[in-house]
Image (cartoon, rainbow, N blue to C red):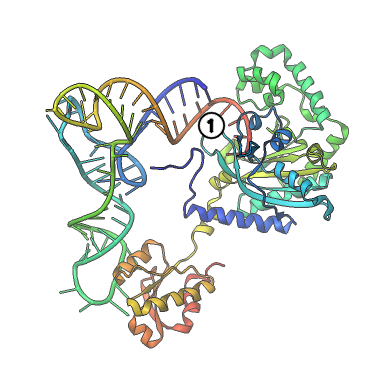
Amino acid sequence: MIRKVKGTRDILPPESRLWGAVEAKARRVFEGFGYDEIRLPVMEPTELFVRTVGEGTDIVSKEMYTFADRKGRSLTLRPEGTAGVARAFIENGLGQRPQPMRLSYMGPMFRYEKMQRGRYRQFSQIGIELLGASTPQADVEVLLALHTFLKALEFDDLVIVLNNLGDPEDRDRFIKVLKDELMPNREKLCGDCRRRWTENPLRILDCKVETCRELVAHTTPVADVVSDEARTHVDAVAQGLEALEIPVRVAPRLVRGLDYYLRTVFEVISPALGEDTVICGGGRYDRLISDLGGRAVPGIGFAIGEDRLIDVLPDSFKHRVLDVPVVAVLPLGDEAAGSALGLTVQLIEGGLRAPAEVTGRSLKASLKWANKIGAAVALILGESEIEKNQVLVKDLREGTQEAVARDAVVERVRRLVGEGDS
RNA sequence: GUGGGCGUAGCUCAGGUGGUAGAGCACAGGAUUGUGGCUCCUGUGGUCGGGGGUUCAAAUCCCCUCGCCCACCCCA
């Protein structure tokens, strides 16, 4: 048997409905804020990610799906979305359009990682990017869009965790401060942190080992080391969010795994699911476009892990999506078959889901089938009904049925199931 | 990369000391004429992860291999 590639997955009905609903909701909310979708290639020149995400990061150093095409060019399946957006912004001259540029994206990303719950090698992200605005208000808007989206999915316990990474110059200064402060206790750090000491010192900050956490807790937060401008910026973001009554928690130890972030960085976690379950991450990246050879265009954005998001979706939203009423159309005999399909068209045009019975089974078996697919109503179309230009409308929940004139069926059914969806 | 667990029907699993495969669920049909949900009957469905070895005989014993899951690490 041929099986799916490790780390990929088949998303089957009915779960696929949730994906569709989440994506539709994302488009609606983000378009409302002015973010139109940009659809980008899933493969890019390898160099794009090396230069943006950062050579020292785990993503680039050991997690990319990199391969040579038939002409020997090094290509990589995108491990994240922002780099491609930046590339497209420069390549398509999007800086010539009215600024700022608001873009959203969604789709599969690829990272060669060791498998674990909630993590896949092909996973999907939904994100937005706001390019060409460097004010705190821009950050607030992006976070507000995020918050609005999550509220539309009926989340009520999610927390935005915010930190200030400062500018790149600040970061170098901070790393020096951090190392100086930890130096006396360097031997007490865990093995991984001693490795991070040289390779990626910032990552010591979010080590999960208890002793490391304690040591780190006594160090100076990044926010205290950053420039006045950076501090003013992120403080204004926090205030702006509070003014909008968006719950924010400042987390002095929050760092992120990509090199391009500066100043505002944030994550969204669900307290109910534990502090480690990050379903969204993002931040400001004012040097990214210029680092790629474009003009100096500031940017801020985030990416939501769609797989995880769907994993933790509130039940209320799930039911709203999954529990839509179904009407089963059951023809009896060849005469009725064509007429039944005509009826389904009318029903779906009326906003209902109305699958028809097409296997030619008996009425008894057809009703069993209607029951199994969760139909609320069955429409029976036999010879006598066709003769009288009627349809037998059977309420499967109540067990009642009545003959209804063909022209009145759609309205009758809509009332029976409570309008139906759109 | 390190450590642990597991691979028998679509799913959940039974199959002491070797005798060539089962249950429940699911799916399909039926219990006379055009009426579901309960019940009953019947049926479809398996290279027992793969390969090799021991044996008259292996799902069962031995060796190798592949795959999956969980934790660490890292991240979304």
Residue pointed to by mark 1: A114
Q: Residue furthest bottom?
A: A388
Count of numbered circles in the view = 1
What's the residue at 37%, 66% (across, down)? Answer: A370
What's the residue at 61%, 26% (across, down)? Answer: A208
Measuring from the top left, give residue A320's x and y in whole percent: 53, 59
What's the residue at 46%, 79% (across, down)? Answer: A409
Q: Residue furthest right?
A: A228
Q: Dot 1 surroundings within 10 Å: few (below 14), some, or many (20 or more)?
A: few
Task: Identify residue type, mark 1.
Answer: Lys
Quadrant in the rendering for residue A81: top right
**Quadrant where the image shows the N terminus of chain A:** top left
In the image: residue A179, left or right of residue A347: right
What's the residue at 69%, 21% (across, down)? Answer: A199
Does residue A21 show up? yes
**Quadrant where the image shows the C terminus of chain A:** bottom right
Q: Is residue A412 above or below residue A352?
A: below
Measuring from the top left, give residue A146's x and y in whole percent: 69, 49
**Helix, strand or loop at disc 1?**
loop
Asked whether A411 or B15 is in front, the reply is B15
Measuring from the top left, give residue B7's x and y in whole percent: 34, 35
Quadrant in the rendering for residue A217: top right
In the image: residue A310, left or right of residue B19: right
Does residue A158 show up? no
Chain containing mark 1? A
Q: Is residue A232 above or below residue A153?
A: above
Asked whether A120 or A76 is in front, the reply is A76
Measuring from the top left, give residue A404's x and y in whole percent: 42, 82
In the image: residue A159, left or right of residue A90: left
Q: Residue furthest front?
A: A71
Asked whether A241 or A405 is in front, the reply is A405
